[in-house]
Image (tube, rainbow, N blue to C red):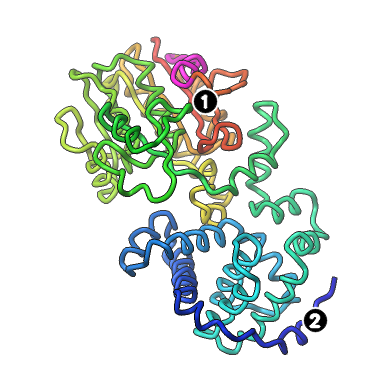
Amino acid sequence: MKFNLQAARECQPKSGFEALREHGLTNPRALASDLLSRVKRDDSYINLLLPTYLSRKGVSEGDRGLIQELTYGALRWQLQYDACIDFLAQGKSIEDSVRVALRLGFHQLFRMRIPSHAAIHETVELVKQKSPKAAGFTNAILRNADRAGLESLVKEASSKCNSIEALSIETSHPAWMIRAFIDALALDSRDDVALLLSANNKTPDVNLAALSPDAMRRLKQAGLAQSPISPIGFTVEGNPEPLISHDVRVQDFGSQLVALTLLELVDKNVDFLDMCSGPGGKSAVLLSGLGQQGTIDCFEPFSHRAKLVRDAVGHDNRVSVLEHFGQSASQNSYDAVLLDAPCSGLGSIRRKPESRWRKSPNQLPELNALQTELLDAGLFALKPGGVLLYSTCSPVISETNSQVVDALVRHPEVELIDLNPTLKGISPTLELNQARKTVQLWTDLHETDSMFMAGFRRVG
């Protein structure tokens, strides 16, 4: 397939778009472009940056949805769009601001209900604001892309790739992540990585955690249906902000299940430790099920994250938020320990699409060493008979199964708890189908983040 760039450059964008601009179609695209530039420049996460940015800019409710879809979509499909853009550019260099605009243009052309002529015109107008000389090039790329169609472009862009590299372009996942997912799925005798990759590319539902009986009542009165996955979970369509309160928070069902599992494994009137508690979501769930005689120490070494934990748990004399590293936990001090370990986060890339492009396999050894260090400290912190729940928002074997196997060798005083019966008790409809004592949730099977859980009990 060959494309005539010069001929396309000579095609001028159609006129008559003043009405579109009056309705705010140009401005949302400019804001989306600015947001994507900030995500890269400041190493920000779009889910954290977007709400405050839109509020500060005074963006209307209608435009918020457009900007969210543009930014999340361009980030999620970045690898695929770049492969197609580079194929069409035929080796020409592309400055960053133009590439960002082209990604936005591709997303409008191929994954949004926006007419092609409008998507192309608005993208060209966006490029004119920063790089006027690149407007013709942008017009050419987008018109050729529109004529070819996405399926044909992806096929051409991946024609010289091996099977993993081709799947990488098709699903917009780095090849190394795909290999890591294949290895992790094999532990559950699964060979259907394409299903997981497809699930990672779907816009996730907004999940809420109801942290009190009154919160559950209010959410039901608001017309929300209780989740079959988490007994405290609800799904909301649209903006969740009107529903958020001290006892209702946004939280993935998988994260809810982690905290609920630890609560089921121990008595409620005991001493808990949340070793890596920021930003506080799991601590809040633990508190919601804590007995009146129970206590929770929430360790979080970074002040800004410790503040988030304090906001999450509120003022409750049973909870202490301490700016400590998890490794500083005193030995033989706790009946229940939650170690939600720092990890690669590959289980939540559907909600944090920019994570795909920031993570590297070279980061894993340092993370694995930290996970091992924290796991040792957490197991030493257990009283006899105490329970530690280890969790990661990642299915990568070096962060999950390998950590468990190695910990059992280093710590003969602990035994592995079979978590499957506990999870089935909490969530009877949850289909685990796993022949192991640990639990791996999968985004494509369970509609949660791909959370991993392992339970340890100190027996000696």
Compared to residue 107, the image places residue 204 above or below, namely above
Instruction: Kindly identify the residue that appears in the image at 68 percent across and 75 percent down.
Output: 142
Image quarter hosting the C terminus: top left
Q: Which is more toward the observer, 361 or 127?
A: 127
Please give left or right for residue 225 compared with residue 279 in the image: right
Instruction: Kindly identify the residue that appears in the image at 44 percent across and 34 percent down.
Output: 253
**Which span is picked out in magenta?**
413-427
Residue 4 numbered mark, or none = 2
Compared to residue 32, the image places residue 80 above or below, namely above
Q: Which residue is mark 1?
A: 404
- Determine whether the residue tagged by mark 2 lies in a helix, strand or loop: loop
Residue depth check, mark 1 versus mark 2: number of the one nearer the observer: 2
Residue 218 numbered mark, or none = none
Q: Position of residue 307 (x, y in %)?
A: 24, 47
Image quarter hosting the N terminus: bottom right
Q: Residues within 10 Å of mark 2 (few under 14, many from 20)?
A: few
Please give left or right for residue 53 compared with residue 138 in the image: left
